[in-house]
Amino acid sequence: MNKLEKIINQTKGKHSDWQEKLDLYIHANWKPDEYDEEEFMKIITGMNDIFKDIADCFYKYGNFKDSWDDNYCRMNPFGQHLLLKSIKTNDTFDFGIDLMDATIYLNCYLYHPENLKYADDDYWELLLSLKQFGDFEFKQNAGISSTEEKYFNGKKSNLFKLLRNYLIYEIDNINLPNDERKYDLDLGWYEIKWKIDCPWEVLVGNACRAFKVLYKLNYQLWKVSDVKNKKLINVY
């Protein structure tokens, strides 16, 4: 039995409790009038407890040289999510539920996207590996103009969309004076989803693998900025 199998096995005693809390959460959100405020808050807390239990599996499996702040939960119109904040990198991952499309999801913004030019082939291979663990998609924030769309419209490849938006942004900046260049690059975020009825052992296993990959992807880009900042400090 490998490390991940042991972690999954340790959660099996909680699966029936998780399922009961999930079913109650779904019912309460579709029929909220059946519950008073105190009951509803307990149901929300129960769902959050599931996310925290599984997040603990992320940390065990990843064995990161990091610490985590996971004390905050946010509500949204279609569900809720737990925020997993890395103390080392200051990056935040969202682990939550979307009742509108009946999925459980894990996502994180593409932090430090300006450092993509330093990414090696291993980075892109790692990114594409996310497809093995669930329904993976790069969700883009940066739009393209109608002229650019005419030549670069591609909707099937996550990798193409990411590189296209990054390169268009950088090319637009090339001929601008320093004081006119844009430094607020916001390409979007990585998201991986699972159906809400996904077996718990499958969800835990694939979510652990996906979280470790997402952390590595952002860590590589963060490290470039971290090294640069340390060099600047040493200069002064």
Image (cartoon, rainbow, N blue to C red):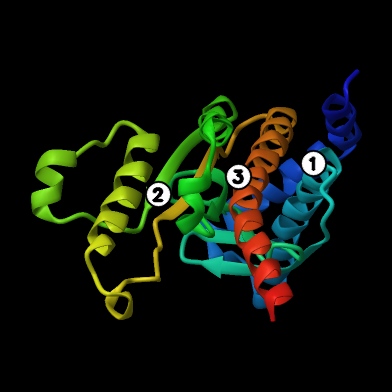
Of label 2 and label 1, which has the lower sequence position?
1
Quick check: 103 above or below 176? above
The residue that disc 2 covers is 139
Tag 3 and tag 2, C-beta contact below 8 Å: no
Quadrant into which the C terminus falls? bottom right
Of label 1 and label 3, which has the lower sequence position?
1
Quadrant into which the N terminus falls? top right
Looking at the picture, which amino acid does disc 1 mark?
Gly
Distance, label 3 to label 2, CA atoms, is: 15 Å
Which sits in the foreground, 8 or 219? Answer: 219
Q: Farthest residue in the front direction?
A: 235
Which sits in the foreground, 29 or 110? Answer: 110
Q: Farthest residue in the top direction?
A: 1
The residue that disc 3 covers is 217
Looking at the picture, which amino acid does disc 3 mark?
Leu
SS type, badge 1? helix
How far across and how far down the image is residue 215, in percent? 67, 47
Quick check: 79 above or below 36? above
The residue that disc 1 covers is 62
Distance, label 2 to label 1, CA atoms, is: 24 Å
Q: Is residue 187 visible?
A: yes
Distance, label 1 to label 3, CA atoms, is: 13 Å
